[in-house]
Image (tube, helix red, strand yellow):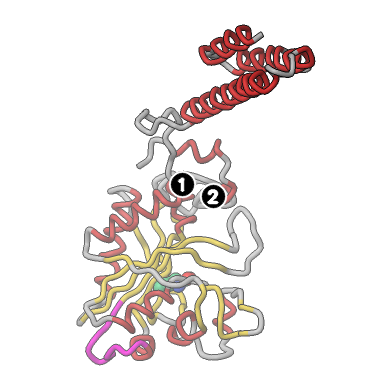
Amino acid sequence: MKEKIGELLEDVKSFHADNMDQLEAFRIKYLSKKGIIPALFADFRNVNSADRKEMGLLMNGLKNAVQEKIILLKNSFENTSEIKEKPDLTLPSSSPLGTRHPLSIVRNDIIDIFSRIGFNVSEGPEIEDDFHNFSALNFPPDHPARDMQDTFFIEKDPDIALRTHTSSVQVRVMQNSKPPIRTISPGRVFRNEAISARAHCIFHQVEGLYVDTDVSFADLKQTLFYFAKELFGENTKIRFRPSYFPFTEPSAEMDISCNICGGKGCNICKYTGWVEILGCGMVDPNVLESCGIDNNKYTGFAFGMGIERITMLKYQINDLRLFFENDMRFLEQFKSSN
Ligand code: PHE
């Protein structure tokens, strides 16, 4: 019996398994109810008392050797499978390249166009106070003009609201810097509007501001003419219609010749040949004063446009809700764009 245990111990020590199945067979062979170890322990009865101590030690040694072997091999399998699951970070990606959202493409185009003529980019908070969103921009308290932009107020504090335009950012720029100021403010804005093909309660704007000595309406026109041609093509024409904004005087809305039909008339321009793209005007002297800029010395122009609207015109998209649904069939159509 002593010899038999010695042989079994050699077997156990030299045993190697390539996988879990082989290891399990090994375990069953030795440790299961009908396995070698229980059989040995059953035979222990027949060992004479002089040899019992030595045999007991040998048998326990064999049992321990089997158990250790199982643990050792099990660990080695787990470690290798762990290594297999770890990603190889040096491999090239097999996933397809992502695409930019159409609104981001157009926002970047607009930023590019204005940065070429010296405009920087400014950003500000989406949750604003009344001063930056309204008062500094010449909206008198309780003036109906505040209703032009249906506002989301923060409950319990009517002084705090989600900004309705990024003009609020320009107030901050004017407060914190000295002319000459040339800045554009892209960003998300919020208005309490019913969601439809033409309107959403969240949308994006780019507003622009130029403040310096001797800034005139001619500068405004020339800047926006350059912008429209760069974005919509060399043959684009522009026209201004008088309008009203509390923060600009005079104010105008700017149309471009319809980029779809070239001005001949189609359903996009409702057969007028023109489409409206932005609001603009000369900064009201009251606004300059509210923001700490000497309105005897400086004048300025401002403009603001909705990125959704510009993108719809540029890519002939007829429903604004598509921008917010993240339907891959829509987004993938912008694959080849920058
Ligand atoms: N802030 C205006 C709006 O959100 C747009 C605008 C900006 C108009 C600057 C004129 C001058 O509708």
Residue type beneath disc 1: His
- In this view of the protein, which residue sits in the foreground, 48 or 11? 48
Q: Residue at x 50, y 29 (%)?
A: 79
Residue 136, x across and y down, in percent: 43, 86
- Contact between marks 1 and 2 (CB within 8 A): the answer is yes
Q: Residue at x 33, y 56 (%)?
A: 228
Q: Which mark is residue 101?
A: 1
In terms of secondary structure, where does tag 2 sit? helix
Pointer 2 residue: 323
Q: Secondary structure at mark 1?
A: loop
- Please report the bounds of the magenta region as a residue range: 291-300
User: Foreground: 157 or 146?
Assistant: 157
Give residue 199's position: percent from left, percent from top. 59, 59
Image position of 246 with respect to 4: above or below = below
Q: CA distance from mark 1 to mark 2?
A: 8 Å
Q: Position of residue 62 (x, y in %)?
A: 62, 19
> 330 or 39, which lies in front?
39
Q: Quadrant of the N terminus?
A: top right
Relative side of 195 to 48, left or right = left
> At which x and y percent is residue 225?
29, 60
